[in-house]
Amino acid sequence: MAVPQVAVVDFGSGNLRSVAKALARSGLDPRVTNDPDEVRRADAVLLPGVGAFADAAASLAAKGLDEAVRFAIEDGRPYLGICLGLQLLFEESDEHGRSAGLGVLPGRVRRFPEQGPAGERLRVPHIGWNEVRFAGRHPVLASLPEADYFYFVHAYRALPGRDSDVVGRAEYGGAFAAAVARDNVLAVQFHPEKSQTAGKRFLDAWSVWMARCR
């Protein structure tokens, strides 16, 4: 059986090579691409991201990658979003002004407050290891521990419009959505490619699931 091909969408963000290497270690065939047709043909799509929401959304639209990603999702292909790739699924963000996202999931993206609920100062961006507690029925989560530590780097977090889309939560000045899912779409705010054993376990589980979806 051929190794499943994953289109790693290149919209000018960094961190593409480390993501591709992590996918290869999990038995997949990553293809870093900015070609919308290649995204449409791939067995699965991964949207990574380091950078600003508005710039990423504009770059995706300019290259026709936004429509290619929506096409793949609507066609039932497995989609994995990482960090900005989670945030871009939602309707809009207020990062550097109001910007429209892909609109795949209802909700907004907002900056972390700089003060916690007890008045404590929060460092923004949120950088470092944090516990994620999974709760949901997505098949990828079935073989994972209920809680594990992953690496985060982000100043903004998603506020999903539907609680049922949230399948993982972490705490930073209150609970926030660390993983969201619906049908063939799964996205995480943390970086599995930087999360050592826990990240490898997560990508292995996604690899097994996406192979079954073919």
Image: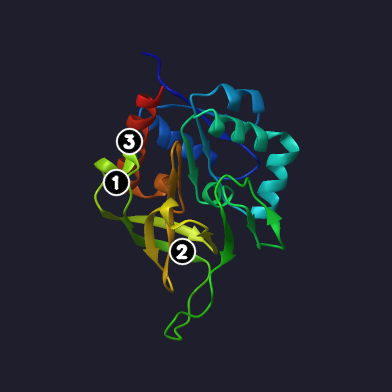
Q: CA distance from mark 1 to mark 3?
A: 10 Å
| Residue situated furthest top in the rendering | 1
Residue behind mark 2: 127
* Label 3: how many Cα within 10 Å (few below 14, some 14–19, many 20+): many
Q: Is 5 drawn above or below residue 205 in the view shown? A: above
Residue 58, x across and y down, in percent: 72, 46
Q: Residue at x 61, y 45 (%)?
A: 13
Could you say whether the residue bearing mark 2 is in a helix, strand or loop?
strand
Q: Residue at x 48, y 81 (%)?
A: 121
Q: Quadrant of the C terminus?
A: top left
Give left or right: position of 128 versus 54: left
Query: Residue 204: which disc?
Result: 3
Given the image, on which type of amino acid does mark 3 rest?
Asp
Of mark 3 and mark 2, the one earlier in the sequence is 2
Q: Is 159 drawn above or below residue 64 in the view shown? A: below
Q: Is 148 drawn above or below residue 30 in the view shown? A: below
For the image shown, how many numbered marks are present on the structure?
Answer: 3
Given the image, on which type of amino acid does mark 2 rest?
Ile
Residue behind mark 1: 197
10 and 63: which one is in front?
Answer: 63
Q: Are marks 1 and 3 in contact (CB under 8 Å)?
A: no
* Label 1: how many Cα within 10 Å (few below 14, some 14–19, many 20+): few
Locate residue 35: give its quadrant.
top right
Q: Are marks 3 and 2 in contact (CB under 8 Å)?
A: no
Give left or right: position of 91 versus 175: right
Query: Residue 5: which disc?
Result: none
